[in-house]
Amino acid sequence: MSGNSHAESIITIIGVPLAVLGVLPILYNTLATLAALSKIKRMLRHGKLTALTRSDVVNRVIEVELPRYAVQPWDRFSSDEYWQISRQPSSIPGGSWTTFNWKTNTIGIKTQRVEYADQLRQPQVEVEFHELVAYLLDLGAVPDAHGWRLLRSTGLWTPTGCSLMKSPDQTRVALAIAPLDDADGHMSLKVAWEPSWTTRDASTLPPYWIRLPPSPPPKEEPEESFSSSQEVAESEDAKDSAKAEDEEPDKAKTLPKKSLDSIQKQAERNARMPITCQISIDGIQSALSQDQGPPLSTRFSAHSLHIEHLRINSLKKNGAWFASTATAYGTTSQTVLWNYKIPDEIMAFARRDTVPCGVLEILGIVGAESCPQWATQYNDTMSDHDVFVRSMQEQRIAVAAEARMDPAQRQIAVKQRQEREMMQRMNNMQDRSRREAQRRETRRHEAMQSPKWDNNLVAEHNLTWLRARKVVDSELALREVVGTLLHRMVLDGDFTSEIYEMLDTWMAWADNGGMRNNDLDILQAKYEKFAMASLLVALVKDATTAHEGTLSMDLQECLRMWKVVRLG
């Protein structure tokens, strides 16, 4: 009995500690899992994230289900959250997008199995690349030229951390390449922003918008005429009111007149106010007429304009030409219009030399001293002298012969000589007229075959010609004149059609190997429209030449290559 009790004591002393040691890992896993789960829940609460969590204490596994979102910025014109960053951004890796306030839309659920809280990753969100870039630009971010060039050339192989956008002082990174862990083949980005970096507000013009200035008012407009016309208008209003008191007018007849007057007044106001246009990837999207002040601060305070004649379609190039010219006008200023790509055919046309200098000379636009030698030179002095000497010799011989005749024969001979001389003079005049007509036709043909000038040089001479005719203000530079022309195109559909018909004619003769007689006739009849069209072409050429291979082209190509990106 003593031996059995001694054995039981040994088993108890050794077995109980072994049993406790066997339970300790389970207890440790349970405590570690509960601690990790508690930390994960705190991280989720801090980031204001809705998630479903499950834990397996035995296997020390925590499952977290987080929603995946598609996001886009709030409306710039109606939401204050557009300019504010989040007060409690998520600290979970992959959640840098929570720095900003977004409109979100749930597009799926992602389940993660983690052991430690540090392994938790927040699902990246999907966002339109051009909307993200426009939003950061609107806040004040500055594009990094090196980063965009690298992204354009290497794509998904761009090194992680490569900067695409920087803070306004260009010392910190605002948008950079992120790891591709959760990208699923998309471009992966991460964002950072601080409240002090926001240097723009609702009073600034947003990206992809341009402001078109109205034509300046005529300088020579005496105030007396304005006051007298105002007095006449007031007297007419007084007469109308007196007449209205005497006779009851027919309201049905006066309503159309009032309606027409209001439309006319609105058109006059639109002609005096600047116009803001939104240019997107598909061309012009909207045009608003708004008085000076905070641009587009409230959309309802602006008057929306009719722009159907400027939209891009497959039948006419009007919309493409307007969007291209507006892009060139905006790109040469501080406004960012890199989202619209000028068509290759328009870019190629703007770079080509297509206008013969001889045509400008025969139309009186430039002088002969400005052009190289292109026409055949004629010298008729010797031939005219020979004809004159020969006619004088024949006349002297005839007069000498007449002197030896009797009076009756002399009278007949004189009459015949005078008739012969008259006929000879008429023949000479006809020959001279025929020769001049032939030479004019030859000169016309040689003018169309003369050396072709650069479009910028053509626009320079045309601008001088327009200023001399007081079609445009003499104090405005070429770019400013183009801005007023675009302003007029938005308001006047007929004027737009005339300009773009001339551009189509111009492109047609450029594509067909040169100008023909019919093209020269059209040019001569509508040269003012051609002069205005040449200003548009010159501005497009300046924009395409200045930005070829630069930041704008790199950014434009990247936006076209990556439509949707992952942000986290």
Image (cartoon, rainbow, N blue to C red):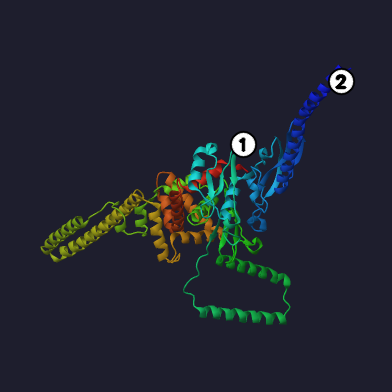
Marks 2 and 1, the one that precedes in the sequence: 2
260 lies above or below 124? below
Q: Quick one: which residue is furthest to the right in this view?
A: 1
Give the quadrant of residue 82.
bottom right
Q: Nearer the viewer, mark 2 or mark 1?
A: 2
Task: Judge from the rendering whether residue 28 lies leftward or rightward of residue 485; answer left or right.
Answer: right
Residue 267's place in the image compared with 515, above or below, is: below
- Mark 2 residue crowding within 10 angstroms, few (<14) / some (14–19) / many (20+): few
**Viewer-closest of 279 and 384:** 279
Type of amino acid under label 2: Ser
Provide the residue designation for mark 1: 181
Q: Mark 2 to mark 1: distance in Å?
A: 63 Å
Q: Position of residue 122 (x, y in %)?
A: 67, 41
The residue tagged with tag 1: helix, strand or loop?
A: loop
Mark 2 secondary-structure assignment: helix
Q: Could you tell me if the residues under marks 2 and 1 are in contact, i.e. CB atoms within 8 Å?
A: no
Number of marks drawn:
2
Answer few, some or many: residues within 10 Å of disc 1's Cα (few below 14, many 20 plus, some between 14 and 19): few
Can residue 283 be seen in the rendering of this structure? no
Residue visible at 82% across and 24% down in the picture: 12
- Where does the image place residue 286, in percent across and percent down from the top left? 60, 55
Q: Which residue is mark 2?
A: 5
Q: Is residue 153 left or right of residue 261?
A: left
Kindly identify which numbered label has been placed on residue 559.
Answer: none
Q: Residue at x 39, y 62 (%)?
A: 464
Q: Is 525 or 365 nearer to us in this picture?
A: 365
Which quadrant holds the N terminus?
A: top right
Q: Amino acid at mark 1?
A: Asp
Q: Position of residue 26 (x, y in %)?
A: 77, 31
Quadrant the C terminus occupies: top right
